[in-house]
Amino acid sequence: MWCAGLAHNHLIVASGYTVRLAFDAADPTRTSIQIQLSVADLIVDDSVIKDRWYPRLQKLDVWGDSYRGMGQEDREDVRTNMLDEEQLYADSFPTIEVRSTTIEARDAARGDTNFSYEVLLAVTIRGETVHRPFVARYEIEDETLIVEALGVFYFTDFGIEPYSKFLGTVRNKNEFHLYLYLRALPL
């Protein structure tokens, strides 16, 4: 997940989560997914994670400009503001939930990647559930299922005014992208 600010983008990554995935290789449209992630475990602008994922997000045309590094103090400020009651309100809404509702075969391209499916995902943030179509694809590599999906949301969809301070001279855009990349082994 990422959001854009005045001077640069932020990369926010889930580190505490549970995933329930039922994949049907014979008919991927029968696949279901449920994800629950801990808001308190979100990682903000980690340079190692950025170095790993920036090239992929750039190829998907999600993150076109370069990114700049942030010091630990700035990262902590962003995290504090992100978890505040005006934003994610982590104290009252400790989880974000994502679940698939429907999956259809539908070709689409994002950047240099072809996606074969459209997944309608229900995403719940701060108790507000929003349904959005995501482009999705899967591949099986050495018995490992790889799922990749991408969709666009707006903070205001969830009743959140984008972060702003200094009379709006520093602020986040309303739009943010939610990017899912999962690797799963059969049980």
Image (cartoon, grey):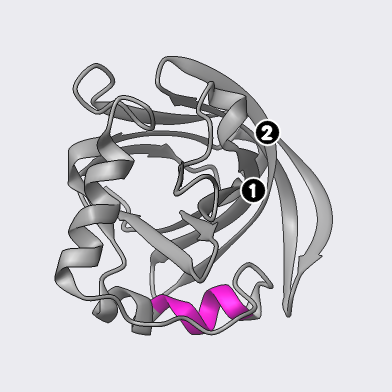
Label disc, if present, on residue 101 of the rendered structure: none
Q: Quick check: 21 left or right of 24?
A: left
Assess disc 2: are there few (<14), some (14-19) or many (≥20) residues with their C-alpha within 10 Å of its C-alpha.
Answer: some
Q: Position of residue 63 (x, y in %)?
A: 59, 72
As rendered, which of 21 and 100 lies closer to the eye? 100
| Residue at which label 2 appears | 132
Q: Amino acid at mark 1?
A: Gly
Q: Quick check: 74 left or right of 137?
A: left
For marks 1 and 2, give the CA distance.
7 Å
Q: Which residues are magenta?
A: 53-58
Q: Position of residue 159 (x, y in %)?
A: 53, 21
Instruction: Determine which quarter of the picture holds residue 69.
Output: bottom left
| Residue at which label 1 appears | 151
Q: Quick check: 80 left or right of 184?
A: left
Q: Position of residue 160 (x, y in %)?
A: 50, 28
Does residue 27 appear in the picture of this structure? Answer: no
Q: Which residue is at a point 36% across and 84% down the rendered structure image?
A: 51
Asked if the residues shown at circle 1 and circle 2 are in contact, with their CB atoms under 8 angstroms apart, the answer is yes
Q: Secondary structure at mark 2?
A: strand
Q: Position of residue 155 (x, y in %)?
A: 56, 35
